[in-house]
Amino acid sequence: MAEANNNTEGRKRWTAIVLTCQNKTSAHTFQKELEIHQSKGFFDKDVLLLTLEDPKARVGSGGASVNALLVVAEHLSAKAGYETLTLSVLDDANILIMHMGRDFPFSSCGRFFNTLPAKHIEESKETFA
C-alpha cells in the first residue's frame, strides 16, 4: 500500500489537499491559487483540491478539521460511485488539511503558499541547450 501513495520521485501522493478559511472570499482566492499550483505540476492532476469556509465563526481548528474530513468523504464517496456518504473511502486516503487562520493584509496569497516546499516536476528549458 505504501508504494501506491508515493510517486516515482518518492514524493507523498495526496488524495486530497484541503485549506480551511475564515470566509468565502479567501476560500475562492485560495482555490484559484491551488489550481494554479496544480496546473504547474506542484500537485498531481488527480489530487482533490478544496478550500472550505469555516462552518461558523470561531469554530476553531478542531471543528474546521471535522468539517474538512466530512466534505472530503462526501467528494470521495461520490467519485467512487456511492450515493451516500461512505467512510471506507478514507481508509487508504492521504489527506492534507491546512488551516489558513486569519487573513493578513501584508500577505497577498496566504502563509500556506509562501512556505510550501515543492519541487517542480517539469524539466527546465535550459537542459535542452
Image (tube, rainbow, N blue to C red):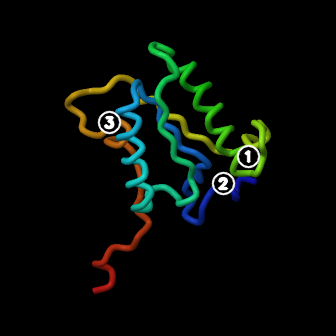
Q: Is residue 125 above or below residue 40?
A: below
N-term-proximal mark, 2 vs 3? 2
In what element is the residue under mark 3?
loop
In what element is the residue under mark 2?
helix
In the rendered structure, which amino acid carries the disc numbered 3? Gly
Where the N terminus falls, by quadrant? bottom right
- For image coordinates 36% across by 33% down, the residue present is 26
Q: Cα distance, mark 1 to mark 2?
A: 8 Å
In the rendered structure, which amino acid carries the disc numbered 1? Asp
* Of 75 and 45, the residue lying toward us: 75
- For image coordinates 62% across by 57% down, the residue present is 6
The crowd level at tag 1 (other Cα within 10 Å; few <14, some 14-19, many 20+) is few
| Res 11 → quadrant | bottom right
Callouts 1 and 2 close, C-beta under 8 Å? yes
| Res 22 → quadrant | top left
The crowd level at tag 3 (other Cα within 10 Å; few <14, some 14-19, many 20+) is some
* Of 79 and 38, the residue lying toward us: 79
- For image coordinates 71% across by 53% down, the residue present is 2
Callouts 2 and 3 close, C-beta under 8 Å? no
Q: Cα distance, mark 2 to mark 3?
A: 27 Å
Where the C terminus falls, by quadrant? bottom left
In what element is the residue under mark 1?
loop
Q: Position of residue 13 (x, y in %)?
A: 59, 53
Q: Position of residue 24 (x, y in %)?
A: 40, 31
Q: Outermost residue toward the top?
A: 58
**In this image, 46 relative to 40: left or right?**
right
Residue identified by numbered label 2: 5
Residue identified by numbered label 3: 110
N-term-proximal mark, 1 vs 2? 2
Residue identified by numbered label 1: 92
